[in-house]
Image (spheres, rainbow, N blue to C red):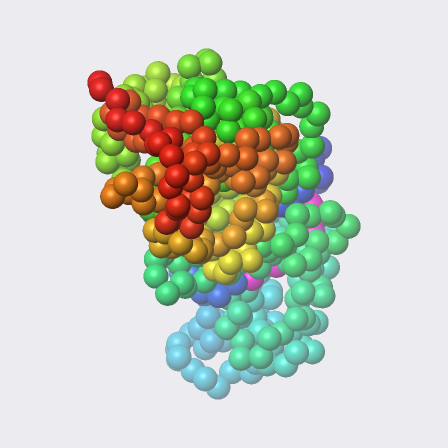
Amino acid sequence: MSSMPALSDRAQTGIWGLDNILSGGFSRGHVFLVEGALGTGKTTVALQFLQEGARRGEKGLYITLSETEAELRDGAASHGWTLGDGIEVFELLPPESLLDSDQQQSLLYSSDLELGETTKQIFEAVERVQPMRVVLDSLSEIRLLAQSSLRYRRQILAIKHYFARFGTTVMLLDDLTAEVADKTVHSVAHGVLRLEELAPAYGAERRRARVIKYRGVKFRGGYHDLTITRGGLNVFPRLVASEYRSQLARSTKSSGIAELDKLLGGGIETGSSTLVLGPAGTGKSLVAITNVVAAIRRGEKAALFVFDEELGLLFDRMKKMNIDLAAMQKSGHLVVEQVDAAELSPGEFAHRVRRQIDEHDIKTVVIDSLNGYQAAMPEENSLILHMHELLQYLNRRGAATFMTVAQHGLVGDMKAPIDVTYLADTVILLRYFEATGSVRRAVSVIKKRTGSHEDTIREYRIDHRGLTIGAPLTEFQGVLRGVPIYSGAALLEEQAT
């Protein structure tokens, strides 16, 4: 086999997120195991690995024991790929046909002979093609031929040592169809990548990847969400906020409403998160979007991620309040994304947010709402961890983040489906209360880490002008309970157009 040209010490996979968690790709000249149940994307990873090699001028060989060459090429075509120059597919013939040409389906062959013939075919194909990258699909066939753990281990070691002589980077695929979990290859392989598929009670399947082992390399541990789309595998590395430490000068920005700024002790600080909490219909989205409008008027860019409301309805509703989101979006100052929690994994959502921040230098982010975001989470604890990392990341990038959470109920003792108040730097509380025979709304700031804030309760109104906030309700007791005791005339009066 010809000697390798001067190359980097990593064989990149062509999948950005996977190379990221592998610290650059697979170490050259080693054997790696990619394992996962049927349908988790092993073949797709393997094909992308060979395609990336071909793009870099590295010859690749796909040895298939389980699929036919036609099936492989059909699978590649479904992603828009053609396995052309630089990639050769070698379809390993069933050993019984080699031993007895007259009786193709004979079962009277020796397993020893069959295993040896299979290995011989593999090595002959490698000698002929002289590849730099090899995929062997799949180990389940070799495991069945070996019939015992000892012979299986010896066979894998023989394959490993054979390829090591030529500095070939090898990807072994295992579909985990063995009745008993066999960790033989785990100990032999230089690295192990596990692909998994989870089926939620509702919505599309969720996929994730995890590097179980990688000798001598500091990889990104834990689970990372992934998707398979036309064009291949997409891996979304788990967000680690500590990697984005920076020294940013904090400044206070106006919300665009003087009374709200007073409540907030002057405004919203950059690099901080604000939670807008309240029951349905209190105007949580409007409070957050009001800050978006103020940011765009200052010449900054903003991003709006909407989970719960159809965008057309949101745009129409805001336009009636003299807020033209469509015009802001068209001008390039506002990025709006509709998020389907049933289809989108938390890791992919964090990737979307990070991409928008990095590409557009966005300084105001709205997530509306966390109730919808929670629907994408398998359990409550995961939401807290995801939100912690995401908010830390946004804070360190100097963005002002606004999140909304809908509480259950309308008045009295209300509860949120998830308590994230301790994660946010500022908490704005919206409430209904009854006075003079009508339902009214009140706003207060109950927490602000970054400075002092007004501890009053103010009434506010939502109409065609948007958000109007009145003076402090100093002559009320029990507003937060929803049924206050009234002793004055400090209510916000209706104003003419």
Q: Nearer the viewer, residue 271 or 452?
A: 452
- Which residue is depicted at the point 67% across and 65% down? 186
- Specify the quadrant that holds the C terminus: top left
| Residue 259 to residue 88: above or below | above
Q: Is residue 295 shown in magenta?
A: no
| Residue 312 to residue 373: above or below | above
Q: Residue lying farthest right?
A: 216
Highlighted magenta segment, given as a residue range:
26-35
Query: Residue 104 location in percent, x, y?
Result: 39, 76
Which image quadrant for residue 237?
top right
Q: Nearer the viewer, residue 445 or 237?
A: 445
- Which residue is depicted at the point 46% across and 14% down? 298
- Which residue is depicted at the point 22% across and 19% down? 496
The secondary structure making up most of the magenta span is strand
- Which residue is depicted at the point 54% across and 46% down? 421
Q: Is residue 27 shown in magenta?
A: yes
